[in-house]
Image (spheres, coloured by chain):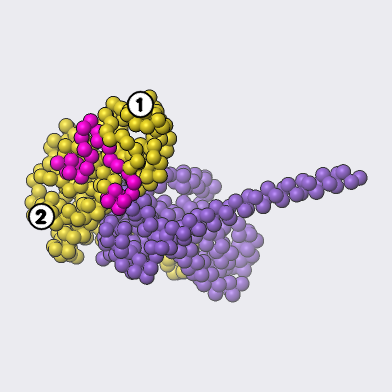
Amino acid sequence: MAEPRSHTQARDFWTATVLWLGAGSVLALLAWILGDLLLQGVGRLSWGFLTEPPSDAGRSGGVAPMIISTLWILAICLATAVPLGLAAALFLTELASRRTGRWVRHSLDALAAVPSIVFGLFGNALFCHVLGLGYSILSGGLTLACMVLPLVVRTTEAGLSNVAQEIRQGAAALALSRVTTLRTLVLPAAAPALLVGLVLGIGRALAETAALIFTSGYVDRFPESIHDSGRSLSIHIYDLSMNVPAGNDTAYATALVLVVLLIASQQLATWGIHRWIQPERSVR
Amino acid sequence: MSFPKSPSALSRSIAAAAFLITTLVGCGSSDDSPSAQTRITLTGSSTVAPLASEIARRFEERHPDVRVEVQTGGSSRGIADARSGAATLGMISRDLAPDEQDLTAFTIARDGIGLIIHADNPVEELSRSQIASIFRGEISNWSEVGGREAEITVVNKAEGRATLEVFKQYFELTSPEIRADVVIGHNEQGVKTVAGNPNALGYVSIGVAESDIQQGIPIRLLRIDGMEANIETVADGSFPISRPLNLVAHGTVDGPAAELVEFSLSEEVHDLIEAQRFVPSRR
């Protein structure tokens, strides 16, 4: 009688141990990375680091122009990718025939698997040369938008198609137009998925180096307009750790700034989405 | 089934997006007008780029009407962009190849690569073939090359480092045949490894080694085939393991670009070159 019970207990114990180990190692890895960044980067951090331009190839001075460029690139990327992505996701769930939908989805999945350096070369050819935008923040932002688009479309679409069909049918029964149904019922219900797409998109865009080095470029001046070349924080980190002797301290400090910027913009996105969606909710 | 014509939040935002994209793309072509500034574009070697950016910053301070844009992408890109006219000047961290003689090279600095040992190691000099044998693992003890009875710790550079390429080329080595005990990334790491191991043999940029020796770090630069490894021999080009950092131009350079080349070759940028751990070139 006692044996099967202890057997079950042992199994429970080991399963729990494995799960704890899994979760623990994920947390440990995150803690390690953040701890390493803090330990090595915090010595270089100061108010001046955030407000001054770099000097001596980045070894001294700050990263202010890179922060500005990064925010501009991110803004252009999101301003393009989010409306386009939302439109494409709505097309897929509301309008596309099964056949068309499959084609579009397959194309998007293929696009999502393309390495970022390919997007970089594509962006360099299309935006910098064919469209004549040159090395500019605009070229960089649009290239990133192409890269982030599949991510935004697929997550948003998943959210939209998870909205219960009964809601749409109920709305139709009440003679609500499709647009009203979408705006007041479907979109708010799909908002969490939209948010996930947005947050993933921000993460990918801020972390990107390969797609930007040939599009937004390497210039570490304050950008005067979006037609200027501007170095992103990620490229600055890459350059400091690969090409600049004794650039490691600044690379760590810049990475710290990037992580904070990432968390801040994701929080802002979350807040923004909730603010946009919440008033609509009251309609229900 | 179709959407009604009346503007809704959704169609408004889609229209706004379409408008945004067309405007953004459209203004690319009319980009030339806003500023009457002269723009000089430099593209190429990522080794030269940080130095070129610093030179550009100082040049812009003296010529407020000129904008110098530095972009990276590797030496090959520098060559291609200088030829196509996409860049005013290319940057390359090597000599011009025989099929690149249509371009003119201006050597602004040199990067020398020296072999370093611990300051306590009695060995003064190694020959080219001895060094190649050590890195191939054929010689593994310092006593075989006139040193103490001790195993040699071979410190090699990580794959993809330009220093490794120059090193391999001079000693006629290939990556698979190098038997390394320690693999390092950047120069500082190499200096630290050798400073902490009396039996190590490594190689780093000579500029970095000299500035570290001056700071009292216990390392020494080895003579190779009787040739002293120091900033002097790199500067006059007599030290063989070095590479030039060049600006290249297709056809004649004139106007502000010519001034920038002249400025890059002048003594006014020597402190910038030394800050990047390179050696100013002697013309």
**SS assignment at label 2:** helix
Residue bearing the label numbered 1:
B144
Q: Label the yellow chain with its letter.
A: B
Picture coordinates of residue A147, whole percent (x, y): 41, 51
Q: Label the purple chain with its letter.
A: A
**SS assignment at label 1:** helix
Give the residue at the far right of this rendering: A1
Q: Is residue A282 left or right of residue B144?
A: right
Residue situated in front as seen by the camera: B162 or B187: B187
Residue bearing the label numbered 2:
B259
The three-letter code of the residue at mark 1 reads: Glu
Spatial CA span between label 1 and label 2:
54 Å
The three-letter code of the residue at mark 2 reads: Glu
Segment tinted magenta in the rendering: B211-236
Chain bearing mark 2: B
First in residue order: circle 1 vs circle 2:
1
Picture coordinates of residue B38, whole percent (x, y): 14, 59
Circle 2 crowding by C-alpha within 10 Å: few under 14, some 14–19, many from 20: some
Can residue A283 be spotted in the picture? yes
